[in-house]
Image (cartoon, helix red, strand yellow):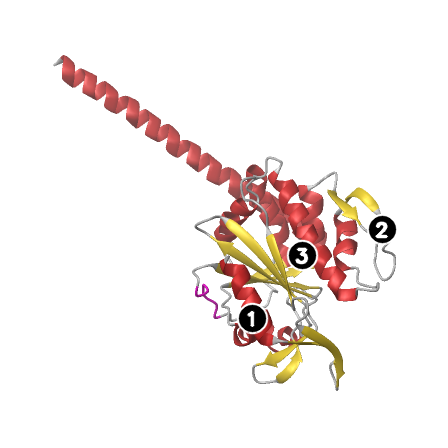
Amino acid sequence: MRADKHRNKKKRIWASILILFLLLIGAGIGYSYYQYNQGVNQSLKKLNKDDTDTKVNYNFEGQKDQYGDTNILLLGSDARGDEASRADTIMIAHYNEDKGTFKLTSIMRDSYVQIPGYGKHKINSAFARGGPELMRQTIKQNFDIDLQYYAIVDFQGFVQLIDEAFPNGVEIDVEKKMTAYVDVPLQPGLQRLNGEEMLSYVRFRHDAVGDFGRVERQQKAVKAIGDQLASIQTVAKLPKLVGVVTPYINTNMDTSDMLFMAKDFFNDERGNVDTLRIPIDNSFTEKRVAKDGAVLDINLQKNKDALHEFITK
């Protein structure tokens, strides 16, 4: 009899613990949803919009690559995916779920490649000709790598993310004076940049190295943002941060996918984000062609080999 009472007491204790655990999960989900909506509404007010239904719904036939990794096509554009425009920034985020690691490849927009159905052109024109799906096909045909997701990011979304995540700015070493063709001029030196200043930093290209320097700064900025976010209590902020950028992003990723990957990206145990630039050094020539102007005529085999070695090492 006493043994039965003891067993019943243990069952009640475990039942209470289970109920408490479920309540905590429910509260966490509710809080995350609330924070996410707070972020969305905050950005919609800045955009003076009631909803995000004006975004173009793109067809995108992506899948994981042959190595089992998830590759995300990141396209920077001022058009927010609502109109035909060339992609100003082309990146691929490589995510290995088993290791929780990220790598980043930047493809220079003037790379002269075959675009399916259109012949040879600058790679950034694939977006204007056929949206992210044609860009996916172009990268697949030229570099033999599959992309599962795409995200077209308006640059103002980048500004809002920085200002929300870093009220005191992102610490970064501005390597030179940047005043030509930027909205916010920058002076050299280690400093904290707000969203508009960071946008000037990653878009500046009017110097002797042009787009090469800009790609290097974009990769440097991604690393700095990831490292500095990982050093603060980020997990609780993630739902709102995702909400803040959502109105500025056209993507085929679910919110849950973005949160899952963001959790790993902002994990302080993530390690370094390795980067690659295509074309790699000594694999291209600069020339001018009719209609496209100045292009980078790249050695496809060298760059394809470099990309696959980068992903798998």
Q: Quadrant of the N terminus?
A: top left
Of badges 1 and 3, the one in the foreground is: 1
Counting residues from the start of the chain, the first of labels 1 and 3 encountered is 3
* Residue 291 image point, x, y percent: 74, 85
What is the x, y in percent for residue 185? 86, 53
Q: Quadrant of residue 19?
A: top left
Rendered position, 197 above or below 59: above
Name the residue that disc number 3 marks.
Answer: 49
The residue that label 2 is drawn on is: 186
Q: Which residue is mark 1?
A: 304
Magenta stretch contains residue 64? yes
In front: label 2 or label 3: 2
Which kind of residue does numbered mark 3 sit on?
A: Lys
Kind of element beneath mark 1: helix
Compute the Cα span from label 2 to label 3. Answer: 32 Å
Mark 2 Cα-neighbour bin, 10 Å: few <14, some 14–19, many ≥20? many
